[in-house]
Amino acid sequence: MNIPEILGKKIKGQLKTVNKVEIIDCDNADVAPPFKKGISGNMTIYYEDDSHVYFVEKNGKRVPLLSTTTIWGLLSPKFDEDFHADNCAKKPDYTCKFLNKKGWDELPHEKKVSRIKTAWHKNNKDATSYGTVAHAGMEYLVKHPELTPQQIMAELKYTYKKPHVRDVINSFLENHKPVIDKWIEDGFELVAEPVIGILSYGMAGQMDLGVIDHKTKSIYIEDYKTNKVRPGDEEVFDYMLHPFDNVPNTAFYHYCLQLSTYALMLLRHYPGYTVKTMTLRWLNGETGDVEPIPIPLFWIDTVHETLENMRQQ
């Protein structure tokens, strides 16, 4: 697989969408706004949420940028949905969330496969929507620290659909607010959901939270995750594709690539600074705890070397 060639085709494929985006005013204090702007060097990066596209304007033309998740997502082996659904349908006791098992024993095999795939799609949509709401809640903690967790929950319930505003989100807010308040009290700059990028790599993204200590020129990168299974505890079924074909294809290792890319972007924005920590904050949906999971810093150099090699190609 020629990743640079694939990325080039993806960039060209986004050009039509990017050219249709309307550039509108935006306020960085808004939570999860439909349109955002960021700065990379002397250029403005634009992001439109509905189409999930990033772009810059250069010499009167719009140039698409690929998202961090798009680039690293190419390293995942393609999931064979038909194959796995077929295997699950053969199991006498298989079940999963949203699976309609009415009349299951009398169903033909093909109907079982179809219902399983439908359940998977519904579960994925539900998990994504819940994650969106949880992230918005954590964003409120930074952008509106004057609000209590209960007031933030009221805002979430007003903005989002009820099934996805789960009660456990209130526990996340209560457990993490003291951490956010302490950083603010210590005088750190907190940047929630900033649009950042590296234009020489043709890429952009949004990290959940950057904590900047200007006194010591230190950067702390935070990213919230709502996975059902704790990142790092996932079962390994396969490995990533080249050049990381010796790395397990699990969420944790994809997050290592993701956060390290954000680190490189922030280091471009804050020259002379040092990344001190990269931390996943796992929002445990069972307990309501916000559990810190460190990402090893050596991944930053690994990702930089990989991206530089891709750029040269």
Image (tube, helix red, strand yellow):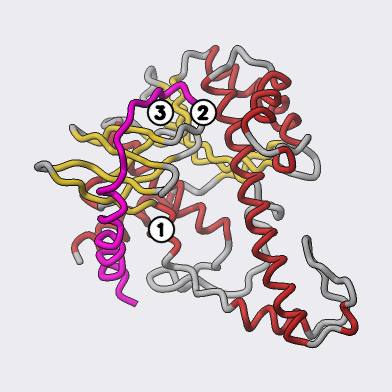
Q: Give the image quarter of residue 207.
A: top left
Tell which tag, 3 or 1, sits nearer the viewer: 1
Q: Secondary structure at mark 3?
A: strand
Q: Amino acid at mark 1?
A: Thr
Q: Which stretch is magenta?
A: 1-30
Which residue is rendered at x = 42% and y = 25% of the image?
212
State yes or no: residue 100 in magenta.
Answer: no
Question: Which of pointers 1 and 2 lies earlier in the amino acid sequence?
Answer: 2
* Mark 3 closeness class: few <14, some 14–19, many ≥20 residues within 10 Å: some
| Disc on res. 31 | 2
Q: How many marks?
A: 3
- The residue shown at (62%, 24%) is 179
Q: Position of residue 311 (x, y in %)?
A: 22, 59
Query: Mark 1 sits on what residue?
Result: 70
* Alpha carbon distance from label 1 to label 2: 23 Å
Q: Secondary structure at mark 1?
A: helix
The answer to whether residue 295 is left or right of residue 300 is: right
Residue 43 marker: none
Label at residue 218: 3
Q: Is residue 141 above or below residue 264?
A: above
